[in-house]
Amino acid sequence: MNAFREHILTLPQLAGEVAEPFMREAAQVLDDDFCRSLERLHLVGCGDSYFAALATEFAFESIAGLPTEAHNAMSFSRYSVVNFDVPNYAQRAQTSLVIGISVSGGVTRTIEGILRAKARGLRTLAITSGAHTPIAQAAGAVLTTRVPDLPSADGVQVPGARSYLASLIMLFACALRIAEARGQSVATWRATLAGAADQMARTIALSDDAARGWAEATRQATEFVFCGSGPNFGTAQFGAAKILEASGDSALGQDVEEWAHLQYFARAQATPTFLITARERDASRAAEVKVAMQAIGRQVIEVAPATAEAPPDLPFAPMPEVYTPLVACIPVMLFAAHRAALLGEPYFRGFGGGRSIEGGGGISRIRTSELVL
């Protein structure tokens, strides 16, 4: 049984169930006056939560017109937040919002970022699975993304798919709420988000067999690179994470432009390289970089909107660029699921070889790390 794939197949139904409730919850929690006063937004998370922040940063800036920065939690909590100790920054605290994203609600570093921000006078909001998680208790307000659990075959923990989608949808709901409070017309954006389930189902139909085929074609590969720009830089990072979690292969997420400055010079020629493009703002540069990838021998796998004129290797259903992370993540997840099944690899290496999930994240101490305030 391919448990990861089975979770991916449930994503359209999940999107249909949560999109409207999440938008209603965001409207209840984010009040008009505060949304209008906002001058800066910080999105903070680790792992998939950080990738969701990267994938939605563009939505806050382009739809809501709000300057936004996505941070990994260590960078924010130990470095960026200290800027608010400086007088010129401190006066901005009341017009800044920190959103800490943690599915479990127990990730120490993200909680630390929330607490250190709150101590400096910043408004804080948690996006997490429940109102009673540690991060929910730490933050000034909370939005819940609890989604129904699925039965797990033989107790196997599956790489995050449903939780990532829930975080994306809630973050998009926040962007729409802030935009609406600031006088922007969001009716079309709301309708598109509410109807995303149909495009996700179409994406699965378009890409499942192709993802299986590419898993077979790249069976002998030992490393993978995922490239994307704008909102799909987050998708690229997420795709690399799913390979690491599902089959344990070395994988890197990279910005398209940065690939041309760095991975372009890598010795290995035939490295499978996923080029994730919305074919909108990123189109011209993605096309140039694809030529460069092919010229030096990379096995390029283009992940892009399905079009008859230029069919991609792994298609997703067309969406406005700002929302493409909702569908672009599906082909790369399916690829990771099929590869793990093909190789017979246990997810997360079966938590063996010194890895464990006990004790708040095992030896890595994700949930029991020292809290610095």
Image: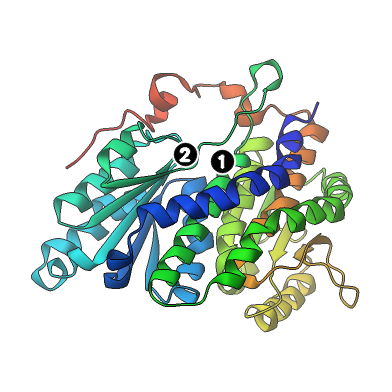
Secondary structure type for disc 1: helix
N-term-proximal mark, 1 vs 2: 2
Disc 2, SS:
loop
Q: Residue furthest bottom?
A: 284
Q: Amino acid at mark 1?
A: Ser
Q: Picture coordinates of residue 269 (x, y %)? A: 75, 61
Pick the quarter of the image with the N terminus.
Answer: top right
Q: Residues within 10 Å of mark 2 (few under 14, many from 20)?
A: many
Residue drawn at (35%, 45%) of the image: 142
Q: Is residue 167 above or below residue 65?
A: above
Which of the 4 quarters of the picture holds residue 351?
Answer: top right
Q: Are marks 1 and 2 in contact (CB under 8 Å)?
A: yes
Which residue position holds label 2?
103
- Name the quadrant containing residue 135: top left
Q: Which mark is residue 163?
A: 1
Coordinates of residue 335 in the picture (x, y in percent): 76, 47
Q: Position of residue 21 (x, y in %)?
A: 54, 48
Visible residue check, residue 324 = no
Residue situated in front as seen by the camera: 61 or 355: 61
